[in-house]
Amino acid sequence: HLIEILSKSFDSSKKDNLKIAITSFTGKATSHLKSKILKAGDDVAIDAKTLNLLLNLKEGKPKFFDESKLNYDLIIVDEASMLDLKLTAHLLNSIKKGSRIIFIGDPNQLPPIESGNVFSEISSLENIEKVHLKQAKRFENSKITDLANAIKNSDEKALDEIFAKSNFYDIEDIYHAKKVILDMEKPSFFGGISEDIKIEDLFSQLKDFIILSAIKKGPFGVETLNQEIFSLFYNKAKLNDYLFVPIIITKNNYNLDLFNGEFGILKIQKTLDGPIKKEAYFQIDDKIQRFEVFYLNSYEYAYSISIHKSQGSEFKKVVIIIPDGSENFGKELFYTAITRAKNEFSIFSTKKIIKELIKISSFKRSALSI
């Protein structure tokens, strides 16, 4: 077990009192990693916090190069491919002398939006100890692994073979492609249902299905798809029915401990005056909490989200939309999208777009590699 092996590498006087922190970009991802480690039988005390909370990054305070140090012997950072240069600098500056840090991630995923592709560059350094996962365990469909490898290796022949056996839809016929997407079976709770539904049941379904798009605007953009799907369900609902709509936080809210990328559920009632937003729910530290909508100033519907925002998430079934104009994002975009799927995937694009896409890399360099 990872923790057990690492604890043995510390001085014997520290073994019984090791202070360990696990961190990632969302509370859900952090809790998920902690639960996996504890299930493995490692009997140690572990703090699980988002990076924002771990580093005490609060609005209105200086964000970088605080002199205080983190009082941990070991820090494990999950989804490290999302680390940008400034955040990494602050993290490393916050570690006390003698501490150890482990970065866990996939260097083939999209680089962070801000400057620096830190994890990918660290992974390529020769004087850094590295462990490579040779066999993916979380995919329950071998075609996902095969497609991810084909994208990574820019293997057009392998792509053609996989597409011939997969749900690949030509996006050039916009009307037909859009109809297929809107008609796809989605989790039942998205429709109008009665008020006595258990919120816990909704959260268990939240990661069953997602539509990932490479773009935000246009007929296949995230904004358009979200509005069309909401209208579809809203129009089917009866008067006074409730709709439970998936949402995603788009800006950190430090007062509520809700951070960019967190998924939640928004309760909306259909009335004669139109849709009324009642309340929202989020899962924080494995507990479901209710929030007044008034306090949620930055969120979007999340029937569909951008591929960039999907990093760090996992869904049973993923619909991937890569329309014309997505080619310059590079193969990391497609790789990130396909590796969000656990069981099933469907792709809406053209083979021409995909073959152009996998020829390009969106790799960004920082001062680490100079």
Image: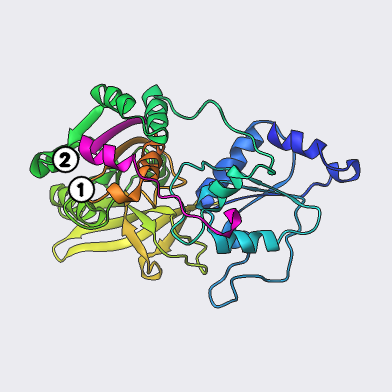
Q: Is residue 368 magenta?
A: yes
Along the horizontal axis of the image, is 163 left or right of 12?
Answer: left
Magenta-drawn segment: 342-370
**Could you tell which of marks 2 and 1 lies nearer the N-terminus?**
2
Q: Position of residue 216 (x, y in %)?
A: 27, 56
Q: Tell me the residue that label 2 is attached to.
A: 171
Q: Residue at x 36, y 62 (%)?
A: 299
Q: Is residue 108 magenta?
A: no
Quadrant of res 198: top left
SS at mark 1 in the image:
loop
Residue count near mark 1 (Cα–Cα under 10 Å), binned few <14, some 14–19, many ≥20: some
Q: Is residue 216 visible?
A: yes
Along the horizontal axis of the image, is 51 left or right of 70?
Answer: left
Q: Residue at x 53, y 25 (%)?
A: 135
Q: Residue at x 24, y 57 (%)?
A: 223
SS at mark 2 in the image:
loop
How many marks overall?
A: 2
Q: Position of residue 366 (x, y in %)?
A: 54, 58
Amino acid on which disc 2 is placed? Ile
Q: Which quarter of the image is occupied by the C terminus?
A: bottom right
Q: Closest to the observer: 242 or 336?
A: 336
Q: Are marks 2 and 1 in contact (CB under 8 Å)?
A: yes
Nearer to us of marks 2 and 1 is 1
Q: Tell me the residue that label 1 is attached to.
A: 324
Q: Closest to the observer: 328 or 94?
A: 328
Residue count near mark 2 (Cα–Cα under 10 Å), binned few <14, some 14–19, many ≥20: many
Along the horizontal axis of the image, is 18 left or right of 366?
Answer: right
Most extreme residue toward the bottom is 60
Amino acid on which disc 1 is placed? Asp
